[in-house]
Image: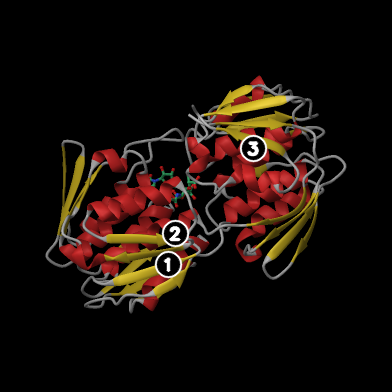
Amino acid sequence: MDKIVVNGGAPLRGKVTVSGSKNAALPILVSSLLVSGKVSFTNVPHLMDIQSIKKLLAEMGAEVHRKEDKVTIDTSGVNKVEAPYDLVRKMRASILVLGPLVARMGKAKVSLPGGCAIGDRPIDLHLKGLEAMGAKITLDHGYVEAEAPRLKGARIVFDTVSVGATENLMMAATLAEGKTILSNAAREPEIIALAGVLNAMGAKIEGAGSPEITITGVSSLAPVEAAIIPDRIEAGTFMVAAAMTGGDVVVERCEPRHMEAIISKLEETGATLTVGENFVRVVGPEKVKNVDIRTAPYPGFPTDMQAQFMAMLTQAKGASVIQETIFENRFIHVSELKRMGAHIVVKGNDVATVKGNGGLSGAPVMASDLRASASLILAGLVADGETVVNRVYHLDRGYEHIEAKLQGLGATIERLHAS
Ligand code: EPZ
């Protein structure tokens, strides 16, 4: 397994370009199942998770081709409605094929995704919504089967704000008979991006980005070409790296409007930000100020940025309190940061108090989930000496060439390929 070796100390300087959004690309690539024909998407990032979803679509009979950042999918040959365990276990977002398959093919059989490092990740809201639309749901031998000659529009109120459930049911509702209303829907930019692609296919979706989304079903959708929006979490990760190393970095080809909570929290830590149309310049403070963080659904502070900010707040004077409200086990990075000398106390499993004052020392550490791995790389950028991050395949799921991008900003970082 590859490792990444970081030597701390260099303030990051220069420009870095953000890639396409993993969490927008995944549902948008899956939405190709709703049409029969050739769709193509540009600015698709080169990530393991994208590889996985391409493999899954091909497994179903779609023809998937990639040329640089453009992915073309021909779904006219889709003849299988099953997402097998060995693919779903690698990438739980595979559950997003459920809604489109039932909507277009009348049935679907998807391995239950099961949990992952950050929590047990249930899919009850996805299934309840499909049932409300008339699907017959059965759970058997670790698979969920959903069947409906034609889904019917329904009013669905989500108990919890869920990005995936909103995406799955919004896609399913595009071909249902009648009107569907999704209430307490997720408002992330990735939802708005997906709705934009579906409407370009001929869907009738209103209200994406608000807590109530209305979808009026149509009989069929048509192929489309679309570009993937920039990745706000990758952008945020580089902005934190600039701030915590006392650097001066321009993060380019990003969408500042998608990052308001990240921008304002960074300014609270004393960083100086210049926000342009499609870039953010971050100049780090002399000394990072301690701040409190509470994760929340969009437009609140994103849970996917919690681990990265925790790494930065180990450098702050004074204590910072971080409350994780979205996932039940998203402090796995704490034990590894403590091995690097961080002073962090976790109460319950949702509140971490980071006692700052810097003083991290490089160490061999273990990556566990995507964003926890990013936080270990960031800690290595300010630690004294060498940090070796093991199991970097977690990183490769969601960051395109992160070590090359950081090298470009002056970091002393390299990837050691497993022999
Ligand atoms: C998406 O995951 C993202 N993944 C996650 O990013 C992100 O952390 C998360 O949204 C929250 O913003 C993708 O978009 C591929 P949820 P998702 O359904 O859809 C509970 C990353 O690092 N819930 O919004 O799986 C769930 O347990 C990844 O890029 C139910 O209870 O998240 C969680 O507590 C990590 N029942 C909360 O809702 C359900 O049926 C939010 O989960 C579904 C979810």
Secondary structure category for the residue under label 3: strand
x, y (%) of residue 382? Answer: 75, 33
SS class, disc 1: strand
Amino acid marked by disc 1: Phe
Q: Percent position (x, y) of residue 233?
A: 58, 51
Earlier sequence position, callout 3 versus callout 2: 2
Mark drawn on residue 54:
none
Q: Residues within 10 Å of mark 3 (few under 14, many from 20)?
A: many
Task: Name the spot of residue 242 as percent of width and height, x first.
Answer: 75, 47
Viewer-side label of 3, 1 = 1
Tell me the amino acid under the disc marked 2.
Answer: Ala
Q: Residue furthest right?
A: 286
| Residue 208, above or below 403 | below
The residue singled out by tag 3 in the image is 322
Name the mark nearer the viewer: 3 or 2: 2
Q: Earlier in the sequence, mark 3 or mark 1?
A: 1
Q: Which residue is mark 2?
A: 25
Q: Assess whether mark 1 and mark 3 are in contact (beta carbons under 8 angstroms).
A: no
- Is there a contact, CB below 8 Å, between mark 1 and mark 2? yes
- How dense is the environment of label 2, judged by Cα within 10 Å: few (below 14), some, or many (20 and up)? many
Residue at coordinates 79% horizontally, 35% vertically from top-left? 316
Point out residue 77 in the picture as x, y percentages from the top left corner.
19, 64
Q: Nearer the viewer, residue 131 or 167?
A: 167
> In whole angstroms, how far apart are the C-alphas of marks 1 and 2?
9 Å
Q: Is residue 257 above or below residue 47?
A: below
Q: Which residue is mark 1?
A: 41
Image check: 15 left or right of 88?
right
Label 3 – label 2 distance at C-alpha: 29 Å
